[in-house]
Amino acid sequence: MAGSDRKRVGVIGAGLIAQAMHLPHLAMLRDRFELTAVADPSTSVRERVGDRPVYVSIDVDVMDPAHAPGTGTPEAGGLTSRELLATLRAFAGLRIVGADVVEVAPAYDHGEITAIAAANVVYELLGLTARGPR
């Protein structure tokens, strides 16, 4: 893919990080995500990618440590697992060609909460990939 065709979507805690790195992506601050809920991020992604192939990468530290404590870089105030799964479900119909889930660190999670959340994320991603347009 050409550089202009690559877009990244992320929910980040510090908006200045994206600006400082000059990354070509849609970075949504947590506050904006809370105000716009699931509809706006999925609409923004749809407008940008159209019918082009989409690769989805989920870093589990996007979730609040209460929902994913097993990560190397926990981010207080992150998404709930329900919010993340709802966001993914809103991507139905996109041409998803691949996906990954990163930053799961079982050693930091005594209750396997993170692994359960990550497994559900993978399940949703597989469903989106299988049901999406080719």
Image (cartoon, helix red, strand yellow):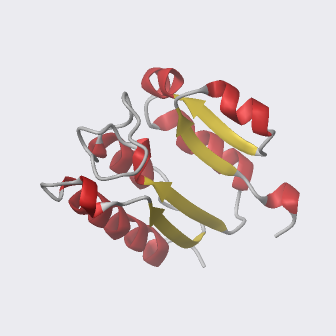
Q: Which quadrant of the rendered structure holds the N terminus?
A: bottom right
Residue at the image position 36 percent from the left and 60 percent from the top: 104
For the question of whether residue 89 can be seen, the reply is yes
Task: Decide which of 114, 51 is in the foreground and name it.
Answer: 114
Spot occupied by residue 83 in the image (x, y as percentages of width and height)? 34, 40
Q: Is residue 115 left or right of residue 126?
A: left
Q: How many marks?
A: 0
Task: Decide which of 17, 128 is in the foreground and name it.
Answer: 17
Q: Is residue 23 left or right of residue 89?
A: right
Spot occupied by residue 88 in the image (x, y as percentages of width and height)? 43, 53
Spot occupied by residue 112 in the image (x, y as percentages of width and height)? 17, 59
Residue at the image position 37 percent from the left and 30 percent from the top: 76
Does 96 sit above or below residue 43?
A: below
Q: Which quadrant of the rendered structure holds the C terminus?
A: bottom right
For the question of whether residue 94 can be seen, the reply is no
Residue at the image position 43 percent from the left and 58 percent from the top: 103
Task: Decide which of 100, 39 is in the foreground and name it.
Answer: 100
Residue at the image position 81 percent from the left and 59 percent from the top: 5
Q: Quadrant of residue 113?
A: bottom left
Spot occupied by residue 50 in the image (x, y as percentages of width and height)? 71, 56
Seen as rendered, the residue at the extreme front is 107
Q: Quadrant of residue 73?
A: top left
